[in-house]
Image (cartoon, rainbow, N blue to C red):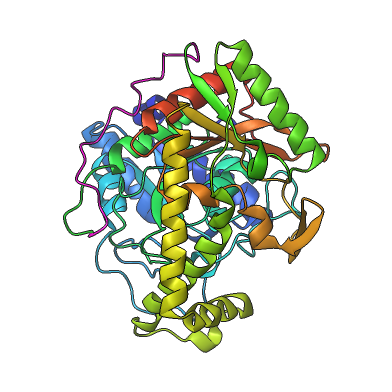
Amino acid sequence: MTELLTIEQATADPVGAVRAALAQIARTEDTVQAFAAVFADEALAMAQRQQETGPSGSLAGLPVVVKDIYDVAGYRTGNGSLGAPEHLATEDSEAVRRIRAAGAIILGKTTTHEYAYGVCTPPTRNPWSLDRIPGGSSGGTGAAIAAGVSAAGLGTDTGGSIRIPAALCGVTGHKPTFGTVSRRGVSALSSTLDHTGPLGRTVADTVALLEVIAGHDPADPYSSPAPVPDFRAEFDRGLHDLVVGVAEPYFCDRLAPDVAAAFDDAVRTLEAAGATIRRVRFADVELCPHVVNVVCGVEAATWHAAQTGMSPDRFGADVQQALAVGAAYTGVEYLEALRARAAVIAGMEAMFSEIDVLVSATIAMTAPPYGATEVELGGKTVRVLDGINALTVPANVTGMPALTVPAGFGSDGLPIGLQLMARPGADATVLGAGRAFETCTGCVELPM
């Protein structure tokens, strides 16, 4: 098992940190295939400069990976697609600019499901079992962290695309409150559902990136002007006096048996550590999958129609079909979906009047086999996308913060994640509770 360097160790020896990361890429990339591009020469040159000038910034010397829908100056934004434009990005996306300014060293761009519109991320494999998917659409970032290449990286999340690969790969991922992190310079999927955010080996690694990339960006119309909170404010709070909700309808009634058992164990762990467990109802949450299908479909089709230089005829069949379905929705159907979304948000607000945190399994099953197009969800065979994102989409519909942390392993030896959610703006509560759970369980492991 590889031991990833801490931020402090990377700061002390940035050249050593980058060389170690590149060596791990050399050991694992042929099988895991987590990278769209590796910036070896640039990363080493930056590390050498930092070694000579001394550390500057909270991420100084830390090798970081970036999902290939973020612009990185001087490189093509490939979007996991044969149909993406050929031109190179002329400037960094805002999140990349911020992590560079904090001293992070970009190792390379990680794979994504094509245009972030899926959960499989071919050709990337899950480091825990190479015959399984890593999840997506930020599958390359999740796989790179699980493969021991980097302690943290950037992903995006429209229906679960940070939390899904984090959970399936046995690492941590946080979808912040909507608008917390700028999306400028990031290819869009759905303008009102997209979130940018971090994945990391641990909650602390994840927060280290979040602290740097969070904050208002006046050039992003969806960026929140709210002050950046102290994301570590509740790191030492523990779980005493925290009211934790469990919504059995929708979140618990379709779990695979081993995932259900792991979730029950996690709830018992939270209770033993001092949390009060309360059974709650999340009114209208069952509307979320339809809301995401319509809203994401329409907004994705609209964004793609406005782009130049693409070759949509070279997109994969799944993305071509999804964009065609999105373009076929009527204005009436879109407005009906927005009304349903408002009902879900009202249900969320009512539920959080009773609790501090809502917990669920992150995904209802462990990682499906590579190449699977369908999975079983609650005894029904559904599309792999619909099965894997069933429990993650409510956080996108409502904009609430959602964190996944490792919560053990299934009967197949593959990772299971625990999802923690809270009212919008309460990222610190979610992160503190996740940190406390992580401390109680010690579930952070790497397979390679």
In the image, residue 268 lies at what x, y percent?
Answer: 67, 19
Q: Quadrant of residue 366?
A: top right
Residue 372 in which image quadrant: bottom right
* Residue 111 % position (x, y): 53, 60
Residue 11 is left or right of residue 319, and the answer is left
**Quarter of the view holding residue 413:** top right
Residue 354 higher or lower than 318, as above or below: above
On screen, residue 185 above or below 210: below
- Rendering coords of residue 117 (x, y %): 53, 67
Q: Residue at x 65, y 54 (%)?
A: 388
Res 268 visible: yes
Say if the magenta span includes residue 384.
no
**Residue in the foreground of this view, choosing between 206 and 286:** 286
| Main secondary structure found in the magenta portion | loop
Residue at the image position 66 percent from the left and 36 percent from the top? 248
> Position of 366 compared to 188: left or right?
right
Residue at image coords 51%, 83%: 328
Which quadrant would the N terminus be assigned to in this image?
top right
- Quadrant assignment for the C terminus: top right
Q: Residue at x 39, y 53 (%)?
A: 195
The residue stretch that appears in magenta: 221-240
Residue 372 visible: no
Q: Is 224 one of the magenta-colored residues?
A: yes
- Closer to us: 51 or 125: 125
Q: Position of residue 40 (x, y in %)?
A: 44, 54
Total labels: the figure holds 0
